[in-house]
Amino acid sequence: MKSPDTEMPESLVEILTPSVAGRPALKVSNLNVHAGNHHILKNINLEIPENRITVLLGPSGCGKTTLLKCMNRLTDLYRELEVTGSITIGDDDILNSTTDLPALRQRMGLLSQRPYPLPVSIFKNVSYGLKLKGVRDKRLIAFSVEKHLREVGLWEEVKGRLNAPATSLSIGQQQRLCLARGLAVKPAIILADEPTSALDPTSSKIIENLFREIKKHYTIVLVTHVLRQAIRLADHVIFMHDGEIIEQGNPGELFENARSDKLRAYLIDGN
Amino acid sequence: MKRIKRVEEKFYIGLSALMTYSLIAVLAFIILVIFVKGFGALSWDMVVKVPKGGYYYGGEGGVLNAIAGSLYIALGATLIAIVIGMPAALYLNVHLIRYRRTQNTIRYFLDALWGIPSIVYGAFGFTLMLFFGMNASLLAGIITVALLISPIMVRTFDEVLSTIPKGLHEASLALGSTRSETAFRIIFKQGFSGFITAILLSFGRGIGDAASVLFTAGYTDNIPVNLDEPAATLPLAIFFQLGSPIPEVRDRAYASAIILTVIILSISLGARFLSKRYSKTNLK
């Protein structure tokens, strides 16, 4: 992989670098989410360290995805969800009603369980976010598209057919395209919701290796229920069960000396 | 045992194929009959002239009055139905997404409306017309046909929208687009060819329906110039000519049927072509 920043014209650096100075860690305090009488997330307190892979681990339905969706306010789409508490980046509480949602979401790349390529060409999928940011310079857009397709290792595979529909790619390629598309808007944090669950082992491995590579530049929050993946990737683990954080810490300690019965049981089942 | 299963399998495949092809054969047969009976009577005059005196006794003229009336009514009604159908389908799919029961109740009513025979719409339109003191006119025809095809439009738009995954919506928002950018740039594009199909389906139903315009649009030998003038339509032109005791006039009924079929076919092909081109140019 090339180190793209070195070949970038000086004047363009500003547009292509993250919109916030420094990459902020994210802090969640007293977060509660209710859906009617159902208490989905119970008093969540955590910190996401910067330039690390933080893994949200736990069985299906424990609230991992909901927690992730709180971080870019996609929870707003679900009217029945009532979110209280605070999630801060720097000094900003993003749960504030005054938050500029498009700007917030451009700071948070999202990689979902299944790839959802936009119904446009491969090229336009990557340039979409830039255009939303108001970038009009064609040279700059082409530069950025190539840079990010290279970053996810897709450039060599697609450079001859950039105008083909994104849906013509294999599902593994689509997922990498979605990652490139997310990276193109220069997020500070990448939210990945079981990004390999629909992929074959080879494609999963490519995504995992990419995460290891790009964590130098990005903070990654990875939701997974696959224990082995957590062991392979995590710098920091948050184990959740039934809407609560049971344990958190660095993976070595957590996996070797699990204190709670729930984590011990999960470790046994997972292995 | 295995042998029996193989025979059974072959039998059912054969049966399915037979049903499929016989249906197509019937359609082909209908078109063949129309062409055989009507082609001799079809002339350029039929398409470019309005009925002259004595047309219905085999005299000179054509059915341009009905062609124009049908196109006016179908286009007007389709436009109104789009204006009603789009927001309604969006409301069903975006705002009511968490209210399954309301959603299904509305869908049930729309399906019921879809199933109501067009003569009932005709009668309803007629009642409305009398209530407002209107005469049989282009406007009354357009409104009645719009009522007839709106449920079709809403339900087909609705089906298209409901096949668009929520994940695509979220993906677009997560890239920093606003809700309306998501709706127009992504959701609309994703559903475009489905929307075209929905519009065509409604247009086809509207232009081909006789019962709803019988009392509401009336019939005239002239091309309507104002909304309050009566308008002729092709289905009614076919109906009236087919009832004639004169063989030449009956043949012209089939010729009018050819014209109606060609209009529907060419609009359908044209829209498909446009929809393909649209999606292609947008990929560049």
Image: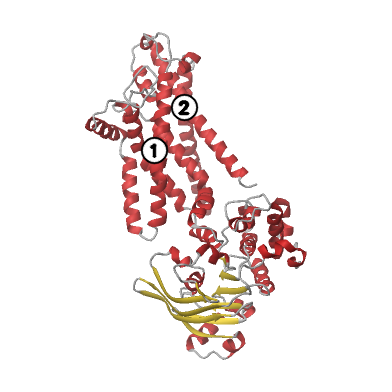
Q: Is residue B246 above or below residue B152?
A: above
Q: Amino acid at mark 1?
A: Ile
Q: Amino acid at mark 2?
A: Thr
Residue A237, given in percent of the width and then of the height, sits at 57, 82
Contact (Cβ within 8 Å) of mark 1 with mark 2: no
Residue B171, given in percent of the width and then of the height, sits at 54, 60
Looking at the rendered structure, the secondary structure element under dot 2 is helix
Location of mark 2 (residue)? B261
Q: Is residue A11 visible?
A: yes
Q: Residue at x 43, y 46 (%)?
A: B157
Chain where mark 1 sits: B
Q: Name the foreground residue: A121 vs A105.
A: A105
Task: Specify the label residue B112 is tagged with.
Answer: none
Location of mark 1 (residue)? B80
Residue A169, given in percent of the width and then of the height, sits at 64, 55
Residue B187, given in percent of the width and then of the height, sits at 50, 52
Q: Is residue A138 above or below residue B23?
A: below
Looking at the rendered structure, the secondary structure element under dot 1 is helix
Q: Residues within 10 Å of mark 2 (few under 14, many from 20)?
A: some
Query: On the picture, is A170 further left or further right than B228?
Result: right
